[in-house]
Image: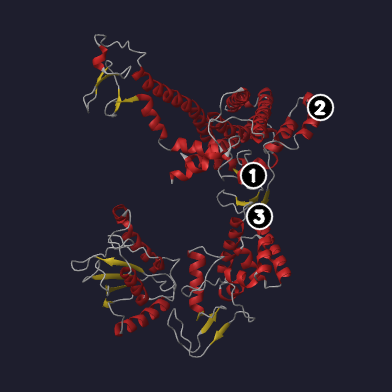
Amino acid sequence: MDSDEDFQSTVSSDDDAMQDTDNDEMSGVEDFDAFDDEPDEEPDLGPNKIQRKRIAYDISFKVYSPTDIQAHQDEMMDEVNMILEMRKEDAAILLRHFRWNKERLMEDYMDKPSKVLEAAGLGSSTINPPRLEFIPGFTCDICYEDDDGLESFAMKCGHRYCVNCYRQYLTQKIREEGEAARIQCPSEGCGRIMDARSLDLLVTPDLADRYQELLNRTYVEDKEILKWCPAPDCENAIECAIKKKDLDKVVPTVACRCGHRFCFGCILNDHQPAPCELVKRWLKKCADDSETANWISANTKECPKCNSTIEKNGGCNHMTCRKCKHEFCWMCMGLWSEHGTSWYNCNRFEEKSGTDARDAQAKSRVSLERYLHYYNRYANHEQSARLDKDIYTKTEKKMVQLQTASGMSWIEVQYLNAASQALQTCRQTLKWTYAFAFYLARNNLTEIFEDNQKDLELSVEALSEMFEKPIAELSDPKLKVDIMDKTSYCNKRRVILLEDTAENLANGRWTFNVDLKSLAPVSSGRK
Amino acid sequence: MAAGLGAKRLGKELSKISSSLPPGITLVSAENLEEWFLDIKVLDQNPIYAGETYRLKFKFSKSYPIEPPEVTFVKLSDRPIPMHPHIYSNGIICLDLLGSQGWSPVQNVESVCMSIQSMLTGNTKNERPPGDEEFVRANRLRPRDIDFYYHDNTV
């Protein structure tokens, strides 16, 4: 289920990508107003704009291209190289060793330079730069070659091998094993790390590209504020300063330049308004068999004597356990022999022995029903979105058909595009509102939330219906206005819902029926 | 790739181990440069291995010695699989120097044999790795995978 969901959302987000540039949630309201024909909306726009400058659910982030990432690394290397007066290659190795924490590097290096160098694999430095050499009488310990013209290489650790072996070793490490930042000397037990200058000498250009790519990766992977965009084939990284401990207060959805929208906290697809931990819990709940267990507890009882699980699929209340032959009453779970003559009609309802068992069962049944209520709605939106998977192509086709049928221009049919997009994003949000609501305790805020949810849901369904209309009807200018209005309304409702939830989340006003903070042991306990 | 590299190296290794090997290690057969068999014995009086001889199979890929060889114990009527918490009952050895992380191209057949020998010598637990049965069952397809892998490399 997990992967399905991911696939689906990626597709829908990719769809977003094609038109998302001026249409994302931050500017959505204004954009749609631009389409709006009603003039009475105009005056509200000014103050709204100012108010919305800082939307509660919006977080700041930056998108970096591979070139940007390279530039950042170069900048830091230059800085270290200038201050500590060391070779740039060494600066790079040190930075990687310190996981790009420049301040810590400087501090530690000033304190104990030789210790730091040793730890980073740069120990016992001599002044000579690495070079290829011909050494008479040299035998390579890897290939056992001993020809006179054998070119050999050694790093400062002095472990010397022939160039050919070195190249093969590096090819293996870089290409097959995906190593870059910490390739060690081939010698057994030697921890010396290959520096950039040695690599320049030894690797072919195509390998160097791969090497650089891998190094870039470690830069992003080492930095907590950087994350790769998880969309397939996307090479960008996103910077976002969100802290792990704040993830119960914000849902940090970021949007890559490629159009993919994902949560910076957990890398899953956008799951606003539900916070990461709830999402994790929800997905786990949906995926694992805890619901099977719930079914069992809701639909079966245990024999009071031997605890065998029994499903009553018909018949009277007089149960005889097939296993231990214990006879009891299904209704009150009490001993059948105590029932006296009240056969098949349990009147011992207030008996203590029975009430506990009944309570537990009733609770479990209610909780299962509650789960299914939310799950069905969640799954429904997921499925609708899946059915809409080809909505973009459908829309495109529709737009072309409409142009020929009604003589409208390309720009005049763009409202369908906007509608399709609104449907996708709103469904994604709605889907998660149900997971969110499942974990909400009942109070006034929840009621407001449910009202918002209902409003959004109704408008989305209405828009969806209009959107599905045949071409003949779509060319009616009245319907066009309706769709545009509804699109704008959906987007507004979504913004309102997200703002409301995000604000309450930030201020800790929600009451959840699970503890968001105590989740770590749950997940680790499962492993 | 560089067939020359592995071939020359294995040739030299073979000529060396044909003439001399450390005590307890004997070369059984090395008919080609892909698969060799060696016998090892544990020399001290470790009761778990006393009086037994074990057969090791070395498989070399084209990238040997850049890549580690695949080393497993082979079961024959007079060659059991030694009991060890890192040796599965199908002969697969869990030893870091045989993985790409722990391997160094400076290692060779002789040094691997000695490492395995000392791994047995130092062992006091007469047991299999945890989950042995399951691992052996789940891994039934692995030889085929490995064949495929080699096949791929030779093409």
Q: Crowding at label 2, few (<14), some or many (≥20) Cα neighbours within 10 Å?
A: few
Q: Which quadrant would residue A483 be assigned to in this image?
A: top right
The amino acid marked with disc number 3 is Ser
Disc 1 chain ID: A
* SS category of the residue bearing label 2: helix
Q: Which quadrant would residue A470 be assigned to in this image?
A: top right
Q: Position of residue A404 (x, y in %)?
A: 64, 33
Residue bearing mark 1: A255
> As drawn, is A510 to the left or to the right of A300?
right
Q: Position of residue A331 (x, y in %)?
A: 33, 17
For the residue pair A469 and A180, the one nearer the viewer reads as A180
Q: Contact (CB < 8 A) between labels 2 and 3?
A: no
Residue bearing mark 3: A65
Q: CA–CA distance between discs 2 and 1?
A: 30 Å
Q: Quadrant of the C terminus of chain B?
A: bottom left
The amino acid marked with disc number 2 is Pro
Residue bearing mark 2: A43
Q: CA–CA distance between discs 2 and 3?
A: 40 Å
- First in sequence: mark 2 vs mark 3: 2
- First in sequence: mark 3 vs mark 1: 3
For the residue pair B10 and A260, the one nearer the viewer reads as B10
Q: Measuring 56% from the left and 78% from the top, which residue is drawn there?
A: A155
Disc 3 chain ID: A
Seen in the picture, residue A177 relative to A304 is either above or below; the reply is below
Circles 2 and 3 on the same chain: yes
